Image (spheres, rainbow, N blue to C red):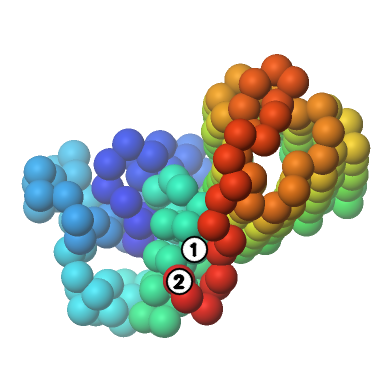
Amino acid sequence: MVIIGAKGFGKEVLEILHQNKYDLDKVSFFDNISNDLPESLYNKFPILRSENAVKEFFERVESTFVLGIGGPLNRYKLASMFAKLGGNLMSIISPQSNIGNFGVRIGDGVNLMTGTTVTNDVEIGTGSLINLHCTIGHDSILGEFVELSPGVHVSGNCTIGDFCNIGTNAVLLPKITLGENVIVGAGAVVTKDVPPNSLVVGLPAKVVKELSPIFRKNL
């Protein structure tokens, strides 16, 4: 398995693999940006630096990969790139998370980190990141490549559009809808629906900036 990203969050993903008793002898990292990394992480896990190295790994070891980086757009772009290289995007779910047994649907490439609680009838779209100690209430839908920072609380009956990024300790009250590509500032409390392509901050959260729309074909 290749973990995309060999720094902070990638190390947290490695820990989840360890907790799940994954064969760590089959793990490598990918980072083609950082110049301050050794050849291997913890003197054990090779760091792949190029697309050719990834292709060779997929052919020689196995073709699975997981997302070990944050940022909805970065996650989408790298997931698309690795899929074109022949990889299969996998989800990573901490055994120390709490997931409802009824009506929960989790897409490919989702990270569910330690301390997360997901109740029943919740849908989490492809490539989404649910960080440490988040909660997602019943009958909520999260789109693709959504990111919840640590400590986010999503109340019941909420809908979150693709590419939304919700800051640390933010709260969505019940029956809230966020359009696509919404950024919610850290600590904000969202009390009403938010239109697409918006930055909201504060208590209660208010729109403070309009964002450029995301067109996937241009990514």
Name the residue that disc number 2 marks: 219
Sequence-first disc among 2 and 1 = 1
**On the picture, is 138 further left or further right than 36?**
right
Residue drawn at (57%, 29%), measured in percent from left and top?
Answer: 185
* Label 2 crowd bin: few (<14), some (14–19), many (20+), radius 10 Å: few
Whether residue 3 is situated above or below residue 206 in the rendered picture: below
**On the picture, is 112 further left or further right than 64?**
right
**On the picture, is 38 further left or further right than 53?**
left
Q: Which one is closest to the eye, mark 2 or mark 1? A: 2
Residue drawn at (32%, 36%), measured in percent from left and top?
Answer: 8
Whether residue 148 is situated above or below residue 195 in the rendered picture: above
Q: Quadrant of the N terminus?
A: bottom left
* Label 1 crowd bin: few (<14), some (14–19), many (20+), radius 10 Å: many
**Percent from the top left, x then y, of residue 186?**
56, 25
**On the picture, is 56 further left or further right than 21?**
left
Element type where label 2 sits in the image: loop
**Percent from the top left, x then y, of residue 18?**
42, 41
Q: Nearer the viewer, residue 193 or 75?
A: 193
Whether residue 78 is situated above or below residue 193 in the rendered picture: below
Residue drawn at (42%, 57%), measured in percent from left and top?
Answer: 74
Distance between the Cα atoms at labels 2 and 1? 9 Å
**Percent from the top left, x then y, of residue 215?**
56, 70
Q: Nearer the viewer, residue 117 or 21?
A: 117
Element type where label 1 sits in the image: helix
Residue 172 visible: yes
Please name the amino acid that badge 1 sits on. Tyr
Please name the amino acid that badge 2 sits on. Leu
Name the residue that disc number 1 marks: 76
Q: Are marks 2 and 1 in contact (CB under 8 Å)?
A: yes
